Image (cartoon, grey):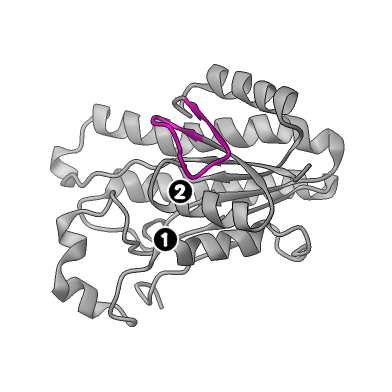
Amino acid sequence: MSDVAIVTGAASGIGAACARQLTSDGFTVVGFDLRPATACASSHVLDVADAVAVEQVFDQVEREIGPVEAVVTAAGYYERVDILELHEHHVDRMVDVLINGTANVCRSALRRMLPRSRGSICTIGSELGLCGDADAAHYAACKGAIHALTKTIAREAAPHGVRVNCVAPGPTDTPLMTPELRDPAYIDSLVLRRLVDPAEIAAMVGFVIAADQHNLVGQVISPNAGAVV
């Protein structure tokens, strides 16, 4: 039986691309999303912000399919809001999906990986968490928090044989992209003069997840088409 990998946000975009990549790498991929994830061997419809549901589904996956050896936290949420219009309800949902959702999934994974002294987790951050962006303060702040969360968890998990890293994509051609980010003038400002393809992000995730990459611990790697140089 192949190793089991869980990918959140697996119904579309970067998550779906990661599911396809890990499947080609030999994993049995289980998707978590608000919609069925057709790129996976099986999928569960749930909100990663619900810690109880996440824990229950991890139990079910390990009971019915096998031990989870790899996890990718690609569940996403994005909106643009001017800082003067940014209110609590905007921040709450962003925090729920990006910070709480990532933490919930990492915690459930680590509860199982640490006693076995093996496993690999790749969180999905953003180049905006490295440089910030106008009209996206809450998104950039949450992605920056994911970078810090990854590094902190990595320090705790590495002595027990579990590697935790982060891939922080730049402007990627996914359904979350807003019209501003598809503006030809913006795309021409990028060093590569194009958006990043989700498959390119997934290839980096596959590299990070790979069991033989033991030197990668607590890293934030940003494939971003030159948006940050």
Q: Residue at x 50, y 51 (%)?
A: 124
The local secondary structure at tag 2 comes to helix
Q: Amino acid at mark 1?
A: Pro
The residue beneath circle 1 is 198
**Exactly how many numbered labels are in the figure?**
2
**Magenta span contains residue 39:** yes
Q: Which residues are magenta?
A: 32-45
State the residue in front, 15 or 216: 15
Q: Position of residue 43 (x, y in %)?
A: 52, 32
Quarter that holds the N terminus: top right
Q: Position of residue 101 (x, y in %)?
A: 49, 33
State the residue in front, 38 or 204: 38
Mark 1 and 2 residues: CB-CB less than 8 Å, in contact?
yes
The residue beneath circle 2 is 16
Q: Amino acid at mark 2?
A: Ala
Q: Residue at x 43, y 39 (%)?
A: 98
Q: Residue at x 83, y 48 (%)?
A: 161
